[in-house]
Amino acid sequence: MAYTEAIRLLKREIETSDALLVGAGAGMSAAAGMAYDGERFEKNFADFHKKYGITDMYSGGFYRYETPEEYWAWWSRHILLNRYEAGVGKTYSDLFELLRDKDYFVLTTNVDHQFQLAGFDKKRLFYTQGDYSLWQCSEPCHQRTYDNEKAVRRMAAEQKNMKIPPKLLPFCPLCGALMTMNLRSDDKFVQDEGWYDAAERYAAFLASHEDTHLLLLELGVGSNTPLIIKYPFWQMTAKNSNAVYACVNSGEAFIPREIESRGIRLNADIGKVLNELKNN
């Protein structure tokens, strides 16, 4: 299918579908300019690159730093850059303009809060993998998360030589263990009350549109976590004969043969696609 024809069909589906389910991955934020490598990384983490050879923000988040003071120097800088000072990415604001008057729900593995910054209704979002703005106990001794903005800003402002002052280390208020990021990386990820509330709203949305004309719009989802968005979207499309699946992903757009007749594939930059959809 030609690019212009795919754009036309996707625009029609957005306008005529009963509801839209958006699945957004890391490619959505990358298309908004929030790259985790290259010039953006070097500008903000040149010292960590020089000392440890780290080449991108993703891998840096898994590095075993020499001290907790260094660990939190990295993470406070990372959170500040990608959560509190990033601003709204154009891909997100363009998508919001397309969906704001529609019955929609967003499932995302992204943790940078961009959907809410762009104006999306919090009750129509499910952040399955956590949020940069939240901490949890590293054990964890309890299933609760904590807002971190005030502490992160202070850590970022007061760090020197790639370390925060020891007095700023965050400890669990219940057991005294060090806090850690509320990001899913192992079986210690805390799914708090807000997480379960969002999961219930997602399930309710799916139940209410089980047989309707549903557009499943996958944006920038790679192959790292296909069990969360990609595979379920394929299965839902196959099960619902009224559903349409659209995949937008530069270099990675794919539609299984079983649902190809109800699929729209755009092997193109997400920013370009959303901008054309909004303006045509």
Image (cartoon, rainbow, N blue to C red):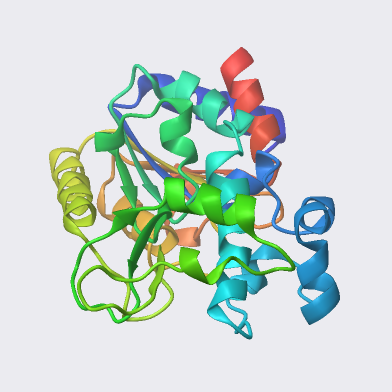
Q: Is residue 204 left or right of residue 55?
A: left
Q: Is residue 273 visible?
A: yes
Measured as percent of width and height from the top left, residue 95 is found at 51, 28
Measured as percent of width and height from the top left, residue 267 is found at 68, 47
Q: Is residue 44 left or right of residue 167?
A: right
Q: Quadrant of residue 221?
A: bottom right
Measured as percent of width and height from the top left, residue 247 is found at 54, 47
Q: Is residue 230 above or below residue 185?
A: above
Residue at the image point whose x is 64% and y is 39% from the top:
270
Q: Nearer the viewer, residue 163 or 217?
A: 163
Count the labels in the image: 0
Quadrant location, the C terminus:
top right
Residue at the image point whose x is 77% and y is 57% from the top:
41
Q: Nearer the viewer, residue 133 or 172?
A: 172
Quadrant location, the N terminus:
top right
Residue at the image point whose x is 62% and y is 14% from the top:
279
Q: Is residue 254 visible?
A: no
Q: Is residue 34 left or right of residue 178?
A: right
Measured as percent of width and height from the top left, residue 160 is found at 71, 63
Residue at the image point whose x is 48% and y is 63% from the top:
168
Q: Quadrant of residue 86?
A: top right
